Image: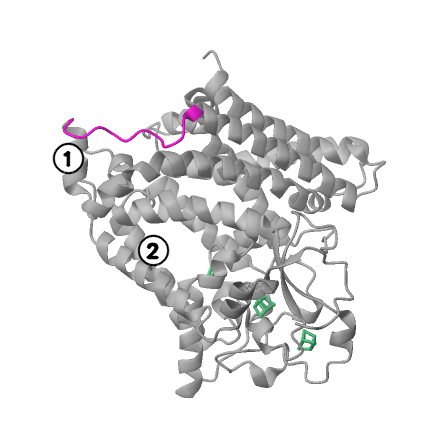
Amino acid sequence: MNMSRDTQKHNGFDLLRINLIRKLVLWAGFPYIFQILTLLVFLALAVIGWGLFPPNGVDDKLFAKTNLTNLTIWGLWWPLMIWGAVLFGRIWCAICPMELISNFSERLGRVIGIRQKPLSKWLRSGVLIVALYTVIQLLVAGAHLHRIPAYTSVFLFTLLAVALFTGLLLKDRAFCRGFCPVGMLLNAYGRGSMLAVRHASDRACASCTSRDCVLPGNRKKLVGRSCPSLLNPAKLNSTSDCLVCGQCVKSCAPSNMTLLLRRPFHSADYREPLASWPLTMFIILVSGFVTYELCTEWVQAEHVFLWVPQQLSLNIGLNTNNGWIKGFWTLFIFPFLLWSFFGAIVKLFEFNTNLTTIWRSLALPLVIVISAGHMVKSIAKFVSWVGFLPYAIRDPFGFKTVHQFTSGILQIPAPIIDKIVVSIIGIAIMLIGIYFAIREFRLTHDESRVYWLIPKLILGIMFLFIVFGKEWSFF
Ligand code: SF4
Ligand code: SF4
Ligand code: SF4
């Protein structure tokens, strides 16, 4: 790494200057060894959860916390992944077992002579990812996918199977680019990532003749592949699609790639003025989901949020707690009403701008507030679930433990951080999120159109109110 760093625009600290990290990223076993380890954990969890349903008369939420599969996937891994995505982009992708499976099956498909196709344009757009994410959220609401170990197990095996088949039939990391249900979330939440793979010197890239980081001939290598996601590492200016796999670092003979640790929402990153349609739809959808998730932490807010679906269920003769109706309200009707309201506010000032353009312009700055809200929910969930881990390790299936909890032999573990402290942390996170959303507005918009800030402020204040009210309300 004796090259002069003549590009200051991506400034930050190059983690590859730390010998240990540099050796690790350049090591042929990275990231494969870590992916194998996470694959083994995923497989073990899928096997543990296989065929398990909560015992009769036991609350499925309590059982979910005592069963190792559900506890690990939904109570620990998922909240950590939300935090990881917002702070460090697609850091999880670097060690993700699904990428390993699709990488392996893509190679197998080539060896056995399958004529693998490139990903079609509509799959690349992310439409299917949004659809899959929606289905999963509906299954969470309607079938309690996140509380029944048997369903979580089927979910994990299905993900692995789809990764296997897409790898066999399609080329160039097709599963990650067109099928992974969390791909859009990582893309949207990771845009302010403090971790970024970037080239160091423009001059070095301009004089590079081999261009190994994009050379098609390198794509089939095991180590030092040209970017398997078909990005151009020498021109990378966003964290949205980079899987931090380190292959470009290995392939770049002049050692011109860096792994930067930098401030969040770096001003040198590219910002799309209009989000794509699938991304906009995803952000609209997730705004409803996160609002509901935050409301579940404050019982009065949950009552208010669910009043409409409960009335609807009553009117059509269903149980007021019908999960499918709740899911439909949370994912479609509520966000549609909320975003129509946001659209109407902007239209008051810019009557000629059409609603779809307003939504697409609002989506990326608003997702910062939404991801901050998601972080708050994640920390609340993590601290109240992690105390169950020692019990779940001792009794992975959870039947004995849940019986001891329900019969009073064992005390339900308290959250590891006091709820008031979590609430204060939550308020701080929301304020930081609102700050960055306003900053993004100033970086991407004409400042005279200050009314574009109103929807961000409304959403931010609404989330802040829920987080604040949870501990300090008099209700
Ligand atoms: S995009 Fe999805 S499948 Fe691919 S590495 Fe990331 S999390 Fe794993
Ligand atoms: S291989 Fe390295 S130096 Fe060459 S174009 Fe790619 S990033 Fe630049
Ligand atoms: S740009 Fe580099 S680190 Fe990012 S996905 Fe491509 S090869 Fe991996």
Which numbered disc covers residue 403?
1
Percent x, y of residue 72: 33, 48
Percent x, y of residue 5: 74, 66
Residue range of the region highlighted in magenta in the rendering: 408-419
Q: Is residue 198 left or right of residue 151?
A: right
- Which image quarter holds the N terminus? bottom right
The residue sitting at 65% across, 34% down in the picture is 434
The residue sitting at 77% across, 45% down in the picture is 443
Percent x, y of residue 355: 71, 41
Q: Is residue 38 magenta?
A: no
- The three-letter code of the residue at mark 2 reads Phe
The residue that label 2 is drawn on is 155
Q: Quadrant of residue 103?
A: bottom left
Q: Indicate which label's residue lies in the foreground, 2 or 1.
A: 1
Question: Could you tell which of marks 2 and 1 lies nearer the N-terminus?
Answer: 2
- Which image quarter holds the C terminus? top left
The residue sitting at 19% across, 31% down in the picture is 405
| Label 2 neighbour load within 10 Å: few <14, some 14-19, many 20+ | some
Looking at the rendered structure, the secondary structure element under dot 2 is helix
Question: Which quadrant of the picture is home to ligand 3?
Answer: bottom right
Q: Is residue 417 magenta?
A: yes
Q: Is residue 438 left or right of residue 396?
A: right
**Label 2 CB, ligand 1: below 8 Å?**
no
